[in-house]
Image: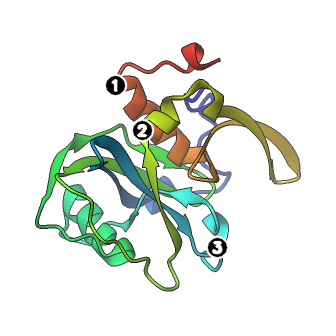
């Protein structure tokens, strides 16, 4: 259900050498002994993905590792203090043809809840989503989206008062699958 569709490739005329690499941070942290993750609602001024739910993250700068970029971007976007954040590993890179990015998700853990602040102009709001909320069968839904004049039905999570779909939903689904979740068992 959350697997990327049959590879469509990049849009016609797109030069694969122009792929922009980005890192996203899937951060786990406890609130009252329950695991949570941090997501952001992107500011309404950010182009194609404005207003969408995403991992904190952004472009990888020359000379940076993927992990360094994910941590730097999380610090810039949500004010994440990095002194108690430990990187656990990476998930599968994901191509996002609509914007020309290849997203490299990084999983990290923090021993406690940090006071987070959304970056003006980049983040409209910060979501702290309980993992159990994502795992609840009623949170997995199908939603309609319009792209290039056509209607698509896409899988999504309803969590934190938002619809989480697209690349972010695919990253979350991969992570939850590693924890033993199955989208088929959520029907």
Q: Mark 1 touching mark 2, by CB under 8 A?
A: yes
**Label 1 belongs to which residue?**
179
Q: What SS does tag 2 mark?
A: helix
Q: Which is closer to the viewer, label 3 or label 1?
A: 1
Residue 43's spot in the image, x, y percent?
A: 58, 75
Please give the label number shown on residue 47.
3
Residue at 63% across, 80% down: 45
Residue 186, quarter of picture? top right
Tag 2 or tag 1, which sits nearer the N-term?
Answer: 2
Q: Nearer the viewer, residue 157 or 132?
A: 132
Separation of marks 1 and 2 at Cα, in angstroms: 10 Å
Q: What SS does tag 3 mark?
A: helix
Q: Nearer the viewer, residue 42 or 159?
A: 159
Residue 13's spot in the image, x, y percent?
A: 65, 56
Tag 1 or tag 3, which sits nearer the N-term?
Answer: 3
**Label 2 belongs to which residue?**
131
Q: Is residue 83 above or below residue 171?
A: below
Residue 36's spot in the image, x, y percent?
A: 37, 47
Local crowd at mark 3 within 10 Å, few (<14), some, or many (≥20)? Answer: few
Q: Nearer the viewer, residue 153 or 33?
A: 33
Tag 3 or tag 2, which sits nearer the N-term?
Answer: 3
Separation of marks 3 and 1 at Cα, in angstroms: 33 Å
Q: What SS does tag 1 mark?
A: loop
Q: Which is closer to the viewer, label 1 or label 2?
A: 2
Local crowd at mark 2 within 10 Å, few (<14), some, or many (≥20)? Answer: some
Q: Nearer the viewer, residue 34 or 104?
A: 34
Q: Mark 2 touching mark 3, by CB under 8 A?
A: no
Left or right: residue 153 compared with residue 44 = right
Residue at 32% across, 38% down: 91
């Amino acid at each position: 259900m959350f697997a990327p569709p049959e590879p469509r490739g990049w849009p016609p005329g797109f030069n694969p050498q122009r792929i922009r690499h980005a890192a996203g941070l899937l951060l786990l942290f406890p609130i009252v002994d329950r695991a949570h993750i941090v997501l952001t609602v992107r500011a309404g001024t950010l182009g194609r993905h404005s207003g969408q739910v995403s991992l904190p993250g952004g472009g990888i700068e020359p000379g940076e590792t993927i992990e360094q970029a994910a941590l730097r971007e999380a610090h810039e976007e949500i004010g994440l203090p990095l002194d108690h954040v430990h990187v656990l590993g990476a998930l599968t890179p994901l191509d996002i043809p609509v914007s020309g990015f290849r997203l490299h998700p990084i999983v990290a853990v923090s021993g406690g809840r940090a006071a987070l602040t959304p970056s003006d102009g980049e983040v409209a709001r910060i979501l702290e989503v309980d993992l159990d909320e994502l795992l609840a069968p009623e949170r997995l839904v199908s939603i309609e989206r319009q792209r290039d004049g056509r209607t698509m039905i896409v899988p999504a999570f309803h969590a934190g008062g938002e619809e989480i779909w697209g690349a972010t939903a695919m990253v979350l689904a991969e992570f939850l699958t590693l924890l033993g979740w199955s989208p088929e068992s959520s029907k």
